[in-house]
Amino acid sequence: MDGVEQLKVQIEKWIDQSHQFLVQFIPYVQQIPPLQLYVAIVVLAFTVLILLLVPLFKRKKSNTIVLSGLSGSGKTVLFYQLRDGSHHQGTVTSMEPNEGTFILHSETSKKGKIKHVHLVDVPGHSRLRPKLEEFLPQAAGLVFVVDALDFLPNCREASEYLYEILTNASVVKKKIPVLLLCNKTDKVTAHTKDFIRKQMEKEIDKLRQSRSVISSADIASDFSLGESGVAFIFSQCQNRVTVAEASGLTGDISQVEEFIREYVKP
Ligand SMILES: Nc1nc2c(ncn2[C@@H]2O[C@H](COP(=O)(O)OP(=O)(O)OP(=O)(O)O)[C@@H](O)[C@H]2O)c(=O)[nH]1
Ligand SMILES: [Mg+2]
């Protein structure tokens, strides 16, 4: 009961103090010209409104990384290697996108705040490639996996697929960073990343020329690539395109992990 009494006394004291404050404050407010008062109230209300609305419109940074590339390039092996640190022997051609939100396996023992990565492995089969469009608008980065072992016979098809990605509206407008990942470097016969980059740049240059002839005939909605009159190189793209090497099979994936962490900040 003693506590309740004390609280009552305290509340009465507060009421008294606020009454005294109002008695002093009202004559002061009355002295202020009404126009100034209204302006002050409007400015105050506006500031509060902005402070309340800003967090609502602040877009949350995406944590989605998309794995794409031709069928057989090693996306699914890479997905499991990033998630579990093992390659799940016996992967078969994927028929559905493989999705997961997790902490990269190499970071599971790290302490402190680590952001989960939403990784999507989009099948490379030509009929399933349109699925990629669904994931691009939310992508923080895209890894384009190339088979460095069996590269030459697939160079044209891989370049065509990459060309489509690099001219995709979401990729261009949102400047989605792309990592050209030369995979399967565990074998000595694998081509180097510089060779692969140059070959693909040449192939994309040819595609760019043939497509520009088509697009001038039937107004294309695509974005054009590179600078006209100059041979195409990846550094001409609006978005950042970098090249790296990996072996999903042996777990040599540090360069792709670095790329992911650069765009999905911990
Ligand atoms: N030597 C070697 N082989 C690999 C590597 N990564 C994947 N492979 C092999 O390549 C084949 C295809 O790998 P997947 O990961 O299933 O290929 P994918 O890109 O998911 O193919 P789709 O699902 O059809 O789009 C499998 O036989 C793997 O064992 C690698 O780093 N080195
Ligand atoms: Mg697969």
Image: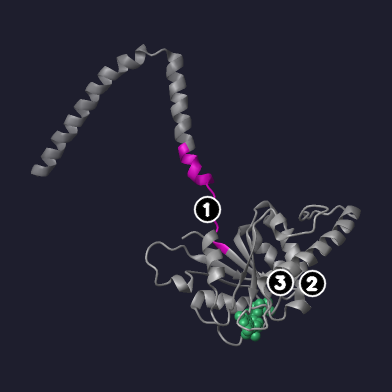
Relative to residue 182, is residue 228 depicted above or below?
above
**Residue 83, position as x, y percentages in the image:** 51, 75
Q: Is residue 185 magenta?
A: no
Q: Which residue is mark 3?
A: 195
What colouring method underlies this structural image? one colour
Residue beneath the point at 47% across and 35% down: 49
Q: Secondary structure at mark 1?
A: loop
Give the amino acid at mark 3.
Answer: Phe
Q: Earlier in the sequence, mark 1 or mark 3?
A: 1
Q: Earlier in the sequence, mark 2 or mark 3?
A: 2
Which class describes the residues within 10 Å of circle 3: few (<14), some (14-19), or many (20+)? few
Q: Quadrant of the N terminus?
A: top left
Which class describes the residues within 10 Å of circle 1: few (<14), some (14-19), or many (20+)? few
Relative to residue 157, is residue 213 depicted above or below?
above
Is label 2 or label 3 in front?
3
Residue bounds of the magenta highlight: 51-64
Give the amino acid at mark 1.
Answer: Lys
Q: Which residue is mark 2?
A: 156
**Residue 29, position as x, y percentages in the image:** 35, 17
Residue 60's label in the rendered image is 1
Q: Are marks 1 and 3 in contact (CB under 8 Å)?
A: no
Residue beneath the point at 60% across and 69% down: 120
Which class describes the residues within 10 Å of circle 2: few (<14), some (14-19), or many (20+)? some
Give the amino acid at mark 2.
Answer: Arg
Is label 1 or label 3 in front?
3
